[in-house]
Amino acid sequence: MQDNYGDETKRAAAAETGGADVPAVAKADTPTVPPGHKLVDPFAHYAAIEGGDAFFNGDYARIDPEHGWVRGREKKPIGATEAFVAKMHEARHGHIKFAKSDGESVEHRTALIMDRPELPPCPACGNIANEHDDKRCDWRPGVYLPLRSVTDPSDVLCFTGNGLGARRAVAQLCRIYAREGPDRQGKSPTILLETRSFKNNAGGTTTWPVFKLIGWDYFTPGVPAPQPRPVAVPIAPPSPRPRKRGVDHDDDIPF
């Protein structure tokens, strides 16, 4: 399935209108909840737990070890003051398989975060992200976040990353997006693309993406984002009360 977000922003508004779990507000279209589950905001759930086929034709934005934030194969630098609106309801996660030769193509298996907050298992080895062995499996966990320029709504790109830092950055933005508070009327986060670096266990430097929130705006100008439907997740059983040696936890009062 191929979608061109650059073209989408030019289409009519009808195209848009057709760290803990946050309880979702029940609505008329609330799905049936299976026994032992509860309804939560999907973006809040993604943030708490970390946030298909190829879907984007434009430039990808990523962090280059030498040049910082860049876009496209030409690695065009992205300015530190260049702001973007994040299309949260189209954020995806899944797995990617990079081409190893000229005859191969990149493969994607992704799902919308708002539909499936839990990262799907690797389509090759079946492992989840925290157990995935990147040295033995050709597929990599990945996350994708469509962005459009604040100054040019027709300029749309997509952030992508395959490491823990990328997933954490999207998860933090999901946490902000899911916060209860003033009605944002369907607006999405407006962000600056920043980074943070730290020393890793190998003696080198690791750089992670940071999405700095600076405001709220419509991804498609004038068109509110759709309200996410709550998803059902298992209700965690209560933790057992700790017992101390030599202490009787009988609740009866001895008098």
Image: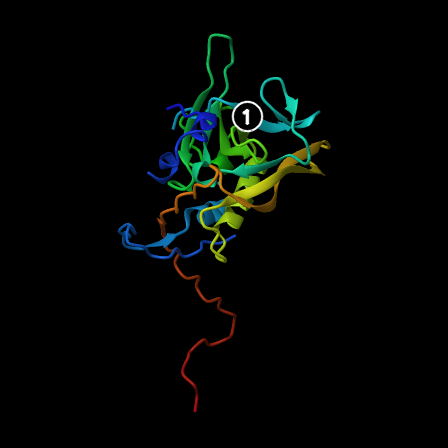
| Number of numbered discs visible in the structure rendering | 1
Q: Residues within 10 Å of mark 1 (few under 14, many from 20)?
A: many
* Element at label 1: strand
Q: Is residue 123 above or below residue 166?
A: above
Q: Which residue is mark 1?
A: 60
Q: Is residue 61 above or below residue 194?
A: above
Residue occupying image coordinates x 52% and y 38%? 86
Given residues 49 and 177, the one toward you in this image is: 177
> In x, y percent, where is residue 224?
43, 44
Say which amino acid is labelled 1.
Tyr
Residue lying at the far bottom in this picture: please name it. 255
Image quarter (top left, top right, bottom left or bottom right) of the C terminus: bottom left
Residue 210 visible (yes or no): no
Residue occupying image coordinates x 37% and y 41%? 115
> In x, y percent, where is residue 109?
41, 27
Residue 115 visible (yes or no): yes
Given residues 252 and 223, the one toward you in this image is: 223
Task: Left or right? Give the position of 31 relative to 149.
Answer: left
Q: Is residue 85 above or below residue 2?
A: below
